[in-house]
Image (cartoon, helix red, strand yellow):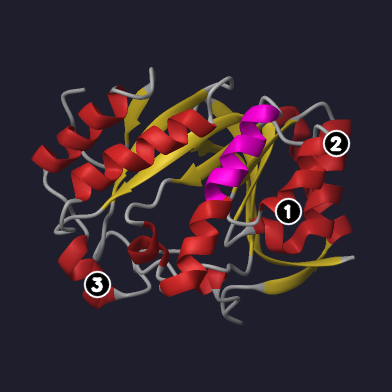
Amino acid sequence: MQLLAGGWKAPSLVDVRGRATFTLWLCGCNLRCPFCHNWRLAEAAPEACRPVELDTVLKALHGAARLVDMLHVTGGEPALQARALERLLEESRGLGLGNSINTNCTLPHLLQPLLDRGLVDHVATDLKTPFHTLAGLRGGTAARLQERFLECLNALASHGVEVELRIPVPREIPGYTRLLEESLREAAEALHGTKWYVVVNPLQGRPLVNPRDEEWCAKHCSPDQQLVDMVVETARRHATRVYVNWVLSTV
């Protein structure tokens, strides 16, 4: 079996908070987020992605098992390579490791078999607000995927999966804090009964990253500290643990 991958790293200390991981980047994605800095992986660009034998990745995972706490599969959208992902999670579990997936959570039908088998311990996902803008989609497609996102959160909670809810923070989005309050309320309701926490990620553009849409990011990335602090305050009304990445903060 082959998978389309961008590479892997072990150990990584930055992908799952508080844990050392074997991190694998898979290619392909069903969203077109304008701020994405892994867009070459998401679009499976030849310069970023290559076919890799699953056995090659498993051999590397075995070699790193003594150095890490868990396997973390990111992308792109890992659920698009569901068969290979399931094998990876099975092998990791056999090595006594935890399993984490960084997913956009809009493909719950592909994640459900993994949840039913108890193969997922931790999920990281973005709370994109407003969804259609940050997902780079329009109309009915965006509305359907937003519904599936909440369906996915419900499924994670019902299986007791720990969730890292990441909030990508843009600037100059009309009514953003009001929309975020509503998004967080819905997410908190969906995640009731499981462990979850919030990581606030102020969106960054060039020169720190190379986003998919540089023009969009020039207008909407790099929010000021006041907006970030407002997002943190909003998040704390719904979550007991709130962390901030990228910018200095007094929280």
Q: CA distance from mark 2 to mark 3?
A: 40 Å
- Contact (Cβ within 8 Å) of mark 1 with mark 3: no
> Which residues fall within the magenta stretch?
149-158
Residue 247 placement, left or right of 164:
left
Q: Mark 1 Cα within 10 Å, few/some/many (few <14, many 20+)?
A: some
Mark with earlier residue (1, 2): 1
Residue that label 1 marks? 109
- Contact (Cβ within 8 Å) of mark 2 with mark 3: no
Mark with earlier residue (1, 3): 1
- The residue under the point 74% across, 55% down is 110
Q: Nearer the viewer, mark 1 or mark 2?
A: 1
Front residue of this view, candidates 178 and 230: 178
Find residue 216 and name its label. 3
Find residue 117 and name its label. 2
Q: CA distance from mark 1 to mark 3?
A: 31 Å
Predominant secondary structure, magenta span: helix
- The residue under the point 35% across, 24% down is 238
Q: Nearer the viewer, mark 1 or mark 3?
A: 1
Q: Mark 3 Cα within 10 Å, few/some/many (few <14, many 20+)?
A: few
